[in-house]
Amino acid sequence: KSQAQSPVLSGSLMATTFPEVLGADISKLLIHKDVQTRKEAGRELEQRVRKALLEPVRGSTEVQEILDTLKKDYIESTSGHYKKGGLIGFAAVAIGLEGEIHKYLGQLIISVHYLFKDEDPRVR
């Protein structure tokens, strides 16, 4: 039996899908081996979320796209570096949302809870 690989997890598609939403710099930095580098990406993402919230019409759509991308391309990845980057990304989004976090809290909790079951203790 051959198993079809999810397009989200396929390496070639990952390189072309999430940089469009997060930006190439943030996408690269979130998966870096160095935790400080991943944190820097988180700070940039936090600022991007804050800026998005200043635009009432497009802002919530952009935040939703960021959350969807972090979940599909990072949290659900098979790579520990991607998962850890996704967690930092989710934390950055949560901080950037400030008073608007209640609108996205369910998504944040479900995705983070998903990783409590991860095999890698460094991800858990």
Image: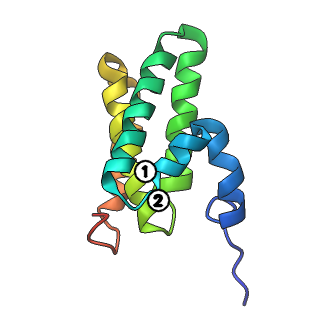
> In the rendered picture of this protein, how many numbered marks are placed on residues?
2
Question: Element at badge 2?
Answer: helix
Amino acid type of disc 2? Tyr
Question: In the depicted view, which residue is nearer to us: 73 or 28?
Answer: 28
Q: Residue at x 30, y 17 (%)?
A: 99
Q: Residue at x 34, y 32 (%)?
A: 94
The quadrant of the image that shows the C terminus is bottom left
Position above or below: 24 against 46: below
Q: Could you say where residue 120 lies in the image, as x and y percent from the top left?
A: 32, 73
Question: Element at badge 1?
Answer: helix
Residue for badge 2: 82
| Label 2 crowd bin: few (<14), some (14–19), many (20+), radius 10 Å | many
Residue 124 placement, left or right of 57: left
Image mark for residue 86: 1
Q: Is residue 25 visible?
A: yes
Q: Could you say where residue 63 lies in the image, as x and y percent from the top left?
A: 51, 28
Position above or below: 108 against 11: above
